[in-house]
Amino acid sequence: METFNMQTTNFEIDRNAVGNYFLTVSILIYVGTLAVCFSPFILVAIDEIVYPGQTLNSWGAGVSFFILFTLMLILVALSAFFLWLSPQQATNLCYRLEGSTLRADGGVFFLFRKSIPLERITDVALVQGPLMRFFNIWAMRIQTAGSAQCEATLYGVRNPEEMRELILSQRKQVYGEKTEDA
């Protein structure tokens, strides 16, 4: 095998769009979870508003409104937390190609550092769902040999097609024809 230049290529990330995407996903998951968990209380409160005094006594109505008020406070507090957390997540993302290894770092409370040897990469898929399309970002899913799930997902990489080709061509340059391009 020939000697390979161990040059490092840092991937540019659209951190603002990724932060907004993470924030939107977090809030949608949170609101959906709250709606499912507290829907009985919401229905009781609506019933009390529409048909006052007919289905609940005043104690039951007071408890229902207290629970809804508490729910609103929790929603406001967690929304503020998500407003802080999402940009932090985007800021801490770092993807780079170092010689024969793809590295992905990130996290806020629990940090992660992933090293993926190029030799194991079998495919780099570009994915863009409706929410990602709204924020004009792509996810690069790194698939490796011997794994049913993707090894890593790189969010918001600028010029994703070029970066995909860079990964695959560098893999081919390092390991030759031994591995196929996806």
Image (spheres, rainbow, N blue to C red):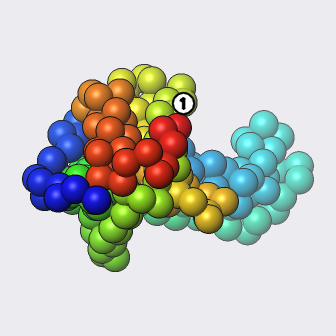
Residue 97 at x, y percent in the picture: 23, 53
Residue 166 at x, y percent in the picture: 28, 37
Q: Nearer the viewer, residue 55 or 18?
A: 18
Q: Residue furthest right?
A: 55
Image quarter of residue 105: bottom left
Q: Nearer the viewer, residue 37 or 13?
A: 13
Q: Residue furthest bottom?
A: 110
Asked if residue 144 can be seen in this view, the reply is: yes
State left or right for residue 102 relative to residue 119: left
Image quarter of residue 106: bottom left
Q: Is residue 160 above or below residue 177?
A: above
Residue 113 at x, y percent in the picture: 30, 71
Q: Nearer the viewer, residue 9 or 99?
A: 99
The amino acid marked with disc number 1 is Gly
State left or right for residue 106 relative to residue 119: left
State left or right for residue 155 relative to residue 44: left
Residue drawn at x 15%, y 48% is 10
Residue 164 at x, y percent in the picture: 36, 36
Residue drawn at x 42%, y 23% is 134
Q: Is residue 165 above or below residue 123?
A: above
Image quarter of residue 50: top right
Which element is circle 1 on?
Answer: loop
Q: For the residue carrying disc 1, how many other residues have a C-alpha within 10 Å: few (<14), some (14-19), or many (20+)?
A: few
- The residue that disc 1 covers is 129
Residue drawn at x 61%, y 63% is 147
Q: Nearer the viewer, residue 120 or 153?
A: 120
Residue drawn at x 52%, y 64% is 70
